[in-house]
């Protein structure tokens, strides 16, 4: 007679989406503070991401800065 499991075989762990979402932060040239651009990206996609130069209104100095990929610092989402 074939051996039978008396208990459930180990289940694969429920995969919680192990995605890491990062905020795109840009350093304000006037105050040197990091400013959240309001955009987010999945961390592992970032190295391959194409980002065009774009603008945002700075929360620190109120001016409009333009930024591109090279300016971005990945940070924790602020929400
Ligand atoms: Zn600024």
Image (cartoon, grey):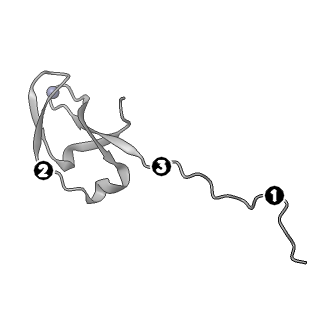
Q: Is residue 2 above or below residue 75?
A: below
Query: Which residue matches tag 3?
Result: 17
Instruction: State the residue at coordinates (25%, 28%).
Output: 33
Mark 1 surroundings: few (<14), some (14-19) or many (≥20) residues within 10 A: few
Query: Which residue matches tag 2?
Result: 52
Instruction: State the residue at coordinates (20%, 44%).
Output: 71
Assign a secondary structure to mark 2. loop
Quadrant of the image for the C terminus? Answer: top left
First along the sequence among labels 3 and 2: 3
Ligand 1 within 8 Å of the CB at mark 3: no
Instruction: Quadrant for residue 25, please give it.
Output: top left
Mark 3 surroundings: few (<14), some (14-19) or many (≥20) residues within 10 A: few
Q: Is residue 76 left or right of residue 30?
A: right
Q: Are marks 1 and 2 in contact (CB under 8 Å)?
A: no
Query: Which residue matches tag 1?
Result: 7
* Ligand 1 falls in quadrant: top left
- x then y, percent, for residue 68: 15, 46
- x then y, percent, for residue 38: 24, 34
Q: Which mark is residue 24?
A: none
């Amino acid at each position: 007679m074939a051996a039978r499991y008396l208990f459930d075989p180990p289940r694969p762990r429920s995969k919680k989406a192990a995605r890491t979402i990062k905020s795109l932060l840009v350093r304000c040239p006037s105050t040197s503070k990091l400013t959240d651009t309001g955009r987010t990206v999945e961390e592992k996609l970032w190295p391959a991401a194409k980002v065009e130069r774009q603008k945002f209104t700075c929360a620190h100095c109120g001016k409009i800065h333009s930024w591109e990929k090279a300016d971005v610092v990945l940070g924790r989402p602020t929400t």
